[in-house]
Image (tube, rainbow, N blue to C red):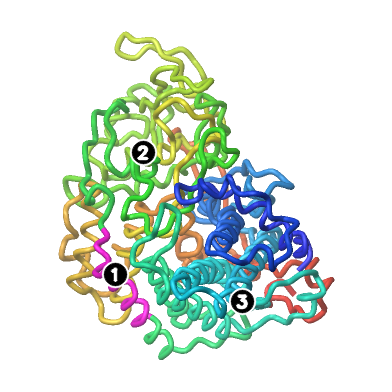
Amino acid sequence: MKKINFKILVFSAVAGMALFTSSCTKNLLDQNPTVDLASAAFWNTEADATTALMGAYSSVRPLFDRDYYLDGQGEYVRTRGTSTTSGNLRLGDAYNGGNYNPNGYGSSFDKMYSYLYGGVNRTNYVIENVKKMLPTAKPTSVANLEAIIGEARLLRGMVYFRLISMWGDVPYFTKIAYSDSDVSTLSRMPIAQIKDSILADFTYAYDKLPAKASATGRAAKPAALAFRGKLQLYWACWNKNGWPELDTFKPDAAAATAAYTAAAADFKAVIENYGLTLFRNGEPGDWGTMGNADVLPNYYYLFQPVANGDPEMIMAFTHGGTGTNQGEELMRDVAGRSHEGSQCWLAPRYEIADRYQSTITGDFAPKLIPTNPTTAGARTKLNSAVNPASYANRDYRMKSSIMWDYEMSVGLASLKSTGMCPFIYKTWASTVTINGVSYITYNTDGCNSGYVFRKFLRNYAGQGRSDGDYSYPVMRLADVYLMYAEATNEINGPQADAIALVNKIRHRGNLPALAASKTADKATFFSAIEQERIVELFAEGQRGFDLRRWRAIERVWCPPYGAGVWRIDTNGANQSQYFLNTTELAYQQCYIFRIPPSERNRNSNLTQNKPWL
């Protein structure tokens, strides 16, 4: 695997291990450097093994903690670029250079392919060396060492799961690669075999991990079960819906049913056996008042550091915060210049607003009407997209996730508050008077839809745009609820317990329970589940993977050779057109990614995916 020099990765690993910051590893920062120690001098104690594991976490974290970029491959998020920089894995090099548009992206993730294999090698490094410790370990240390192996195998399983989700058949190895020559002749292993190996990793992790993580950022049994269930759910979808672009894969209806059943069992165990609850018990909290950010619903705070360590966060990757050089950059990516000079690489598309349902009817509200604000009566017209009143009585997750004209946020500069900052589309850093009070409007010229994110945006001072300490979730309990509902629905149609779980998630948006018509049969309940996945998991990197595993790209956009679909803004202007006269081949290339040509040039045993030949 070129592009990542495995020898450098392996022997720089211990040096980087102390870079992983969480409440469980502060003591590791004080340990003496071990880069130049021989293996026999290092791999002696549980502390040594834990240090190595922290290095694996540090390497795998940047492969998942910016998955919000990937939402640009769906319909509701515009990713206009990334804040990642070349040459620095901590800053998300795996995401650098990727194409985060709804189509044309499949050839743009050669760098991610390489960095994912770097994550594989780091986890193999831990697994192999800690295994060698077991025969001579004290009896009292064996369980802890096996748990460390379990965490490393969970991380390895996550990385391989991502690899097969994007590329299908990929090379598979479980030994330490000390140089390119150790892996440069590997062929692509059939996806069915890799799936079984990933399941084995998740199962080992489940068997060996504690029921509750020892600290924020560490994995426990629920994480292993949830990821095992998710893998089986994807396997079921591929077998049910087919994956024709992967010409070595043959769908099997019986295999789909078995996988849906196994997935449902794992999700049920996560839900019932560990006392997990939704954040703040799934209560909606308070909406506050229109145009006011002093009070925000509970869902907003799920994406703030106050939620770190909450039971809903089944697995989350920690960040160090101010002064650690390990902060997350969520605010830099979702906010504008009025918030510590952030860059708005990510913004909601106009079309997401109509997905937020009415808290009164529990169903979709009348569609918003794009209106130029200079039009007479635009700000007061019924259902006008630039009339703030049009957004009243909507799912509380709307106010928590996006801002529309005249919504406020706390402006931030030089680690201090600059006071409330109203968002008014296309009035970048302008003086405006609202109710007799003078404000400077939100400067976010990276937005072209009429909406910006509130989700992930901090509402307090004291941290720069790159100094966040939020633990980014890669598995949430709400996602498990929805995956359980999906799996059981595929097996037996709408089930009472699954409907109740979907309604729990709706409740956090202050929505009434689903009407009977929404759960009448398998198809209608699936639509209700999909709706909740869209608004609940918005900008968390799930939508693109959902569209591919459901074979739904043509459904949500248009068929091949179609007229294309425009994305617009609140003023009614066309912004971007996708899938215009798009060929069948281009659609196929959306469903499976290109094996990097540079890897194939170095390894003649690597075949190419069919749409990329």
Q: Secondary structure at mark 3?
A: helix
Asked if residue 490 lies left or right of residue 443, the reply is left
- 538 falls in the magenta region: no
Please provide the residue range marked out in magenta.
260-276
- Residue plotted at (47% across, 70% down): 141
Q: Secondary structure at mark 1?
A: helix
Q: Nearer the viewer, mark 3 or mark 2?
A: 3
Mark 2 residue crowding within 10 angstroms, few (<14) / some (14–19) / many (20+) = some
The answer to whether residue 347 is above or below residue 177 is above
Of the residues shown, which amino acid type is indicated by label 1?
A: Ala
Of the residues shown, which amino acid type is indicated by label 3?
A: Lys
User: Foreground residue, 553 or 66?
Assistant: 66
The quarter of the displayed image where residue 493 is located: bottom left
Report, in whole angstroms, how far the alpha carbon at label 3 lies from the one at label 2.
Answer: 65 Å
- Residue plotted at (47% across, 40% down): 469
The answer to whether residue 463 is above or below residue 589 is above
The quarter of the displayed image where residue 156 is located: bottom right
Asked if residue 586 lies left or right of residue 417, the reply is right
- Whole-percent x, y for residue 269 in the image: 29, 73
The residue singled out by tag 3 in the image is 132
The residue singled out by tag 1 in the image is 485
- Residue 369 numbered mark, or none: 2
Label 3–label 2 contact, CB within 8 A: no
Label 1–label 3 contact, CB within 8 A: no
- Residue 534 numbered mark, or none: none
- 265 falls in the magenta region: yes
Of the residues shown, which amino acid type is indicated by label 2?
A: Ile
- Note whether residue 352 is visible: yes
Mark 3 residue crowding within 10 angstroms, few (<14) / some (14–19) / many (20+) = few
Question: What type of secondary structure mainly makes up the magenta span?
Answer: helix
